Structure formats: structure tokens, C-alpha cells
Amino acid sequence: MQNVYGAVIKPLQENVPFTQTVNECCPGYVKKDQSSNPSRDNCIRPHCEKTCINGRCSTQNECECYEPYEKHPTHNTCVYKCNPGHKRVNDVCVPHCSKPCRSGRCVAPDKCSCDHGWILNESGDCIERDLDPIICYPPCGNGSCHFLNRCTCWDGYISNINNNNPRCVPSCRNCQGFCVAPGRCECPELFERKYLTADNQDCDCSEDCDTKCFKTACVLTTTTSTAIPQTIKAIDPPNELDNTGISEIYVVVERISKPDNSSVEPITIVKYYNM
């Protein structure tokens, strides 16, 4: 297999007999010795001491990376490109803020989160809380007051906007009871939690049920021998959960009592209504 090919250079002036053959390394080969002319012995395939993972060895000990990879800034390897707005720090892509987050940290591209005792002003800078007249009423609770009556809630909490109330309340997924903590749905007295799928089937889970299952229902646990449907009003939400948007819960319980001298078990039908 040849690794050198020749090219004929035409003369600069016409009618002047002049030809010269110039050897060049074939595609895929490089010169072993850059000071020497290409020849069969001087043209070799490029070799990289370290394997070019996610790339190819283009020149001697140089890797050319495939998309979406790029060459590492300090060593000859191909690493995954960071998303826009991120930069590589200790081989990890982290958010990048063009303006330093003093008294805080960069949590998203050009977005700072301030340390405790500091708040973010309209310019995106962290300033001491006592030096800023901005207030939120009622207080944010599980969040930070950044602008007038505007709360930035912590992870697991959401801003209650139904009643124009800036307070941050726990966030639960389809909780038919009381959301008392992030992902923690509690039922009132005499009711027990039941995890359901999207089509109201039992959701079988051993842990993290509040996130793995579609919703949490509250099922009445008491027994009654009556065939007359009953409407039982759940306990009102406690005062500390006022203005959270949680409405009163009504549960309709229909029971068919066990017939006399019958082996048939009583049938219980529970229906939930969020009034």
C-alpha cells in the first residue's frame, strides 16, 4: 500500500519545459519527521499514546473530537460539551454567572441565590436584608422576600397565589388531605392514606410513595352497620394552613350491612369530593 503520492507542478511561464514532482503524504497519513520531505518511510499513520475516546487520532498525539464532544482544556481527551450557560469546573458542568454572586452562589445561568441574611435586589445583586426596605406581608415563611410582596419559595414549597397571599406553602402531588410538608400528605383523624394510580387503582410502593404514585386519597377507617349513605365532613384544616387554597373535604360513605345469618361480608364504597 502506498502512503505517498506525487503532484506535478506546472511551469510559471508557458513554452518553458519545466516539471517538478512533489511528494505529499496520502490522506490519513502524516509526516513522521516534519523537517524531511514526504517519503514512503516518512509518511505514517498518526498515533496517539492515549486512545481517543469519543474522537479520532487526527495528527500525532492529537485527538479530533466527535460531536457533541470537545477537547479538554488541559489534556488531550474528548469530554462532553457543557450546555449553554454552563462551564466546566473540576470536570463537572456547573452554572455560569457572568457577574460574580457575592454573598451567594450561582444556581442557574446568570441567576444567583443569596446566602442567609441576604436578599436579591432588582439588579441581581445580593444585599443585606436590613438595608433593604422591601417587605412581604404576610411573611413568606418557607421562602425569601425579594421584592414587595413577592416570595421566592425554597425547594419543595410553592407560592400561594389563590388568595393573593405571598406565603410559601408545602407542595404535594395530588394530595386529597393536608399537605403538611414537601411531598408529605396527611389525612384527618379517622382517615388513612391510600396511594392511587392515575386511573384510581391501588399504587403498590414501598417508599417515596408521594412521588411515585399519582395521588394520595384519604379513606375512612371506621365501620358502620347501615345501608343509608352518609356524608361525613372531614376535620377543618388547622389554623396554620389557612389561606393555602386547601378546601374542605367531604367523603361520602355508602355501606351495605351484612344480612342476618349470611356469610357475605359487608360492602363498603368510599367516594371523595373536594368541595
Image (cartoon, rainbow, N blue to C red):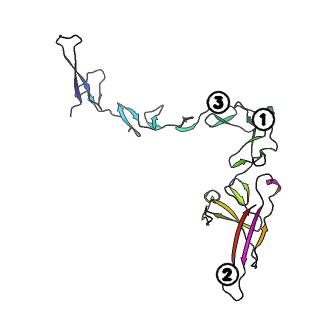
Q: Earlier in the sequence, mark 3 or mark 1?
A: 3
Q: Quadrant of residue 140?
A: top right
Q: What is the C-alpha distance between the residues marked 2 and 3?
A: 69 Å
Q: Is residue 37 above or below residue 86?
A: above
Q: Residues within 10 Å of mark 1 (few under 14, many from 20)?
A: some
Residue wearing tag 3:
100
| Residue at figure coordinates x 26%, y 25% from the top left | 24
Tell me which amino acid carries mark 3: Pro
Q: Is residue 10 left or right of residue 80?
A: left
Left or right: residue 197 versus residue 236 is left
Q: Quadrant of residue 265?
A: bottom right
Marks 2 and 1 in Cβ contact (< 8 Å):
no
Residue identifier under label 1: 129
Task: Point out residue 241 in the picture as x, y percentages from the top left corner.
Answer: 79, 54
Amino acid of disc 1: Arg
What amino acid is found at the position of numbered circle 2 in the picture?
Glu
The answer to which of 170 and 79 lies nearer the viewer is 170
Dots 3, 1 in contact, CB < 8 A:
no
Is residue 252 magenta-colored? yes
State the separation of the CA atoms marked 3 and 1.
Answer: 19 Å
Q: Quadrant of the C terminus?
A: bottom right
Q: Is residue 124 above or below residue 20?
A: below
For disc 2, the neighbor class at 10 Å (few under 14, some 14 to 19, many from 20) is few
Magenta range is 239-259
Q: Where is residue 10, by image quadrant? A: top left
Q: Mark number for residue 265?
A: 2
| Of the image marks 2 and 3, the number of the one nearer the N terminus | 3
Question: In the rendering, at what x and y percent does residue 221 appear?
Answer: 73, 71
Q: Nearer the viewer, mark 2 or mark 3?
A: 2
Tell me what residue is drawn at x 66 percent, y 32 percent: 101
